[in-house]
Image (cartoon, helix red, strand yellow):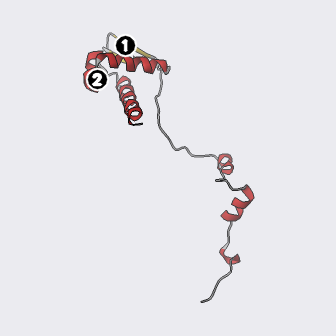
Amino acid sequence: MRQIIKHLAVLERVDQLIRLKATGKPKQLARRLQVSVATVFRIIETMKALDAPIMYDLHRQSYVYTEITSFKCGFYIEELDVEAKEELTGGYGRVFMNRILNFNTNTCCTINI
């Protein structure tokens, strides 16, 4: 599991450098990532296999994206719309959930001690 997380972190770092157009030559990128040049080429090939539009720009001497793209790997919280919220019941039926959500303390019995 740690290896997968480590590999994802490297991909995210390379993605960041590509966005900044600051990877440098493959040898410089390898030194920056503390990997071999062969590993840099494998990383780039992996990203291309994942459909990343990458090319090496000779003028900038950096890898660049040829199209606007984004790389996201992780869990991100999104705001749900009303319909999606209604679908989430946590295993309870909608009627039961409404009863729980509309619970009125006035209808509850009180116990005097």
Q: Which residue: 50% across, 41% down? A: 76
What residue occupies the far right of the structure in this picture? Answer: 95
- Tell me what residue is drawn at x 36 percent, y 12 percent: 57
Does the residue at mark 2 contact the one at mark 1 (Cβ under 8 Å)? no
Q: Residues within 10 Å of mark 2 (few under 14, many from 20)?
A: few
- Determine the residue positioned at 63% across, 46% down: 81
Q: Where, quadrant-wise, is the C terminus in this rendering? A: bottom right
The amino acid beneath tag 2 is: Val
Question: Vertical placement of 72 versus 100: above or below?
Answer: above
**Residue 35: mark in rendering:** 2
Label 1 sits on residue:
56
Q: Judge from the rendering whether residue 88 lies leftward or rightward of residue 34; answer left or right.
A: right
User: Does 24 appear above or below 113?
Assistant: above
For the residue marked with disc 1, what is the amino acid?
Tyr
Question: Percent from the top left, x then y, of residue 48?
Answer: 46, 18
- Calculate the distance from the C-alpha at mark 2 to the C-alpha at mark 1: 19 Å
Spot occupied by residue 31 in the image (x, y as percentages of width and height): 25, 22
Q: In this view, does 6 lie to the left or right of 51?
A: left
